[in-house]
Amino acid sequence: MKRLFALFSLLLMLAPTAHAQDGGDRAVDDVRGAIEFVQNLSSETIAVWSDSKLSASERYTAFRAIFEDATDIELLAQGMLGLHYRTITKEQRETYMKAMGDYIIAEFDKRMAQIGFKSLEVSGTKPASGKQGHLYVRTEVTRDEGQPILADWRVRKKDGKFQIVNLEFEGINLLITNRDLFSSKIKRDGFDGLIAWLRAQNTMPGAQGSTAAEASR
């Protein structure tokens, strides 16, 4: 009986620790870490954009390296294709993912350039819906011209690493907007038409060569 009681007591002592370890690998359970992640991403991006010594190609390469590491491109790409992702072949998925790697990076760069991204201040956080433990880091973006705008970064934490899984500017959802657009493209032009359109959108310096090579295959 004493052994049973001792074992039960030990389980009670270990249970909170185990729960804390599991929960600690979710963004919603590490708010400070998520905020620092977004702040560091902002600082790195501004440093690249403000470096007048970089050529357009060098700037693209540096920007891409930052956002490839900071963004879950595969998750975003699947979300943007929606239900269509389940119906395409393995070969089509591979082709799509290659095209999307360039497209998503170009989209982030284009959106930030459009708003005149100058600096970023975190204004708060909000747990995202769902069971994934994602967190919205809410920010106010100071622009070169015009009033500041609001940007919400949906952040995940997996295996101790933070990544962006979606972005909203003034209520415009990057994932949902592209999902609707892609669905329309597929309905009108087919899957191959979507791929051709994705490749055509990638006009980033330094990426044109790889895009042309993909298109010629």
Image: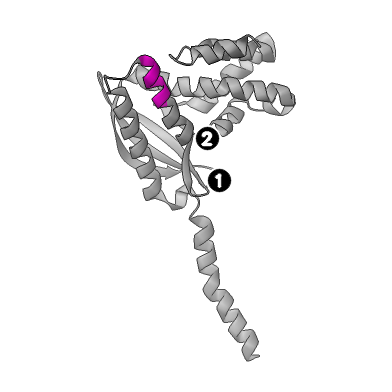
Magenta span: chief secondary structure? helix
Q: Residue at x 61, y 81 (%)?
A: 7
Q: Residue at x 62, y 90 (%)?
A: 2
Within 10 Å of disc 1 (Cα), the crowding (few <14, some 14-19, many 20+) is: few
106, 137: nearer the viewer: 106
Residue range of the region highlighted in magenta in the rendering: 56-63
Q: Residue at x 63, y 9 (%)?
A: 216
Q: Name the quarter where the C terminus is drawn.
A: top right
Q: Earlier in the sequence, mark 2 or mark 1?
A: 2
Magenta span contains residue 60:
yes
In this view, 166 is above or below 98? below
The residue to which callout 2 is attached is 72
Where is residue 193 shown, x and y percent of the image?
A: 65, 10
Q: Name the quarter where the N terminus is drawn.
A: bottom right
Mark 1 element type: loop
Circle 1: residue type: Gln
Task: Describe residue 78's horizontal placement relative to residue 113 as left or right.
Answer: right
Measured Cα–Cα span from mark 2 to mark 1: 14 Å
Quadrant in which residue 36 is drawn = top left
36, 205: nearer the viewer: 205
Where is residue 79 shown, x and y percent of the image?
A: 59, 30
Tell me the mark number nearer the camera, choosing from 2 and 1: 2
Where is residue 44 shown, x and y percent of the image?
A: 33, 33
The residue to which callout 1 is attached is 132
Where is residue 64 shown, x and y percent of the image?
A: 44, 26
Mark 2 element type: loop
In this view, 120 is above or below 114? below
Within 10 Å of disc 2 (Cα), the crowding (few <14, some 14-19, many 20+) is: some
Magenta span contains residue 15:
no
